[in-house]
């Protein structure tokens, strides 16, 4: 079972790398360069979760703060590395402590005062995500074209088609 738990994610990462980096030669250095977050940070965050859920049987919720923080940071870093989107993904680092604190709140004593920093960090992170994502959509960071233009055209077409259906009935 342990071999499958380790080999499965490694095969997924290798397949994703081969899918996204077909034009480059695959070397151990390039694999580590793209997947350092999944290889080093994510397992450490999952280790903290494993410690909480299996070894302490829920008696040490403080383990969830670094666990949630590290898992969130690993996801943010991995997405940014795969898609080259550090300029958009950086607000995830503000969200990371909010995730760790929320896990502590949820599985701990449910101290309502924890909701204050959780909400402040989450709203601040989502605000920055929205601002920088809109900027990226309008300047054409995704797919080399301003995606917002296509979304607006598609929304207009859907509105026109939906209004025609209502008129016929």
Image (cartoon, rainbow, N blue to C red):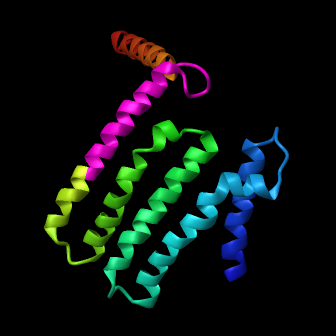
Left or right, 3 with reference to 69: right
Residue 127 sits inside the magenta stretch: yes
> Farthest right residue?
25
Q: Position of residue 44 (x, y in %)?
A: 53, 72
* Residue 22 visible in rendering: yes
* Residue 1 visible in rendering: no
Residue lying at 54% horizontally and 52% vertically, measured from the top left: 77
Residues shaded magenta: 121-146
Viewer-proximal residue among 155 and 93:
93
> Farthest left residue?
113
Residue lying at 35% horizontally and 51% vertically, measured from the top left: 94
Q: Position of residue 52 (x, y in %)?
A: 41, 82
- Above or below, 137 against 15 in this view is above
Viewer-proximal residue among 4 and 121:
121
Residue lying at 45% horizontally and 89% vertically, measured from the top left: 55
Residue 123 sits inside the magenta stretch: yes
- Above or below, 164 against 41 in this view is above
Viewer-proximal residue among 166 and 114:
114
Left or right, 141 with reference to 59: right
Position of the N terminus, as image quadrant, is bottom right
Position of the C terminus, as image quadrant, is top left
């Amino acid at each position: 079972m342990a071999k499958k738990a380790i080999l499965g994610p490694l095969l997924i990462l290798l397949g994703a790398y081969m899918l996204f980096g077909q034009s480059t030669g695959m070397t151990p250095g390039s694999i580590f360069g793209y997947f350092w977050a999944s290889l080093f940070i994510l397992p450490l965050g999952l280790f903290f979760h494993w410690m909480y859920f299996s070894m302490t049987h829920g008696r040490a919720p403080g383990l969830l703060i670094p666990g949630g923080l590290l898992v969130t940071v690993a996801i943010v870093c991995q997405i940014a590395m795969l898609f080259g989107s550090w300029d958009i993904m950086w607000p995830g680092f503000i969200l990371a402590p909010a995730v760790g604190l929320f896990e502590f709140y949820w599985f701990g004593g449910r101290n309502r005062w924890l909701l204050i920093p959780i909400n402040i960090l989450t709203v601040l992170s989502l605000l920055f995500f929205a601002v920088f994502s809109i900027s990226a959509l309008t300047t054409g960071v995704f797919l080399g074209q301003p995606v917002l233009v296509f979304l607006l055209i598609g929304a207009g077409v859907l509105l026109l088609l939906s209004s025609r259906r209502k008129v016929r009935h």
